[in-house]
Structure formats: structure tokens, C-alpha cells
Amino acid sequence: QGQLAESGGGSVQAGGSLRLSCVASEFTYNQYCIAWFRQAPGKEREGVAGIYTGGRGSGDYADAVQGRFTISRDSAKNTLYLQMNSLQPEDTGTYYCAVSYSYYSDYACLTARSGMDYWGEGTLVTVSS
């Protein structure tokens, strides 16, 4: 069974940056949809950025983070990253890494949410004003 482990969360002031990491291990196949989701207190979980590892795309993003966040992968390290710049208080929440074998495009990864098969435990990001 696949396992995901996020790290890199923390507390920053508005305008600051963080880089989240997600190490993927024990996945049978190396082509899958992998994405970052977040959940703020009292709100539903939402997609932040997603990428299909079997494609040629560079990822798809939620409108709220477009231009500020960048998703990337180091396939040799089986690690997914989320570089977050110009953080705002509304970016506060628990960030999760998730994987699915059922989606085959960056956009589908971004919007899958309940369709993801594997989830990490999450890492907390707090942005103060």
C-alpha cells in the first residue's frame, strides 16, 4: 500500500514563503495523479495544485493560488513539492498530499478531492497578518 508523508508546514507572516514536501513510498506503479489539498477550519477540503506524473504537464492550480504557488516533483526522490510564495492569511490550513490511479490529467488531479485513494496525515500552515 502506498504511503505519503508531508512536511514543511509552519507559521509565517503574510508575504512570506514556505516549501512543503511529500514523500511517496510503496506505490506499485510510478504513474499516478498526485495533488496538494488544503482544509481551513470550518471549511471543506479544496484542491490547491495537482499533477499527473505520466503526462507532460507542469501542473494545474486553483485560481486562489495561481501565480503564487508552484508544484514540482523530484522523481528520483519520489518527492512532491509545493513552493508557496506571497502567503496570505486565507492560505492558513492543513495541507494534504494525495494520490490516485484513477485520473490522467493535471486538472483532474486538482479537482478529484473525494476521488483520491491515498492521503497523508497533513502538515499545518499558519499565516498571520
Image (cartoon, rainbow, N blue to C red):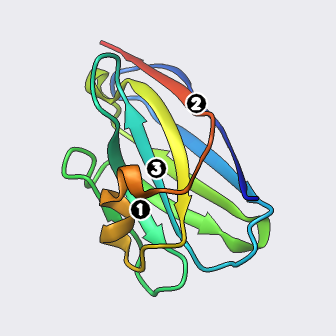
Residue 123: mark in rendering: 2
97 over 105 or under it: above or below: above
Q: Residue at x 27, y 47 (%)?
A: 65
128 over 97 or under it: above or below: above
How far apart in space, not on screen, are marks 3 and 2 (Cα)? 11 Å
Q: Earlier in the sequence, mark 2 or mark 1?
A: 1
Quarter holding the C terminus is top left
Mark 3–mark 1 contact, CB under 8 Å? yes
Res 40 seen here? yes
Q: Amino acid at mark 1?
A: Gly
Q: Which residue is mark 1?
A: 50
Q: Amino acid at mark 2?
A: Thr
Which class describes the residues within 10 Å of circle 2: few (<14), some (14-19), or many (20+)? many
Residue 36: mark in rendering: 3
Mark 2–mark 1 contact, CB under 8 Å? no
How far apart in space, not on screen, are marks 2 and 1 (Cα)? 17 Å
Q: Earlier in the sequence, mark 3 or mark 1?
A: 3
Task: Say left or right for 73 vs 91.
Answer: right
Residue 67: mark in rendering: none
Estimate the x, y position of residue 49 in percent, counting from the top left.
38, 56
Q: Residue at x 25, y 54 (%)?
A: 66
Estimate the x, y position of residue 14 in percent, counting from the top left.
34, 22
The secondary structure type at the circle numbered 1 is strand
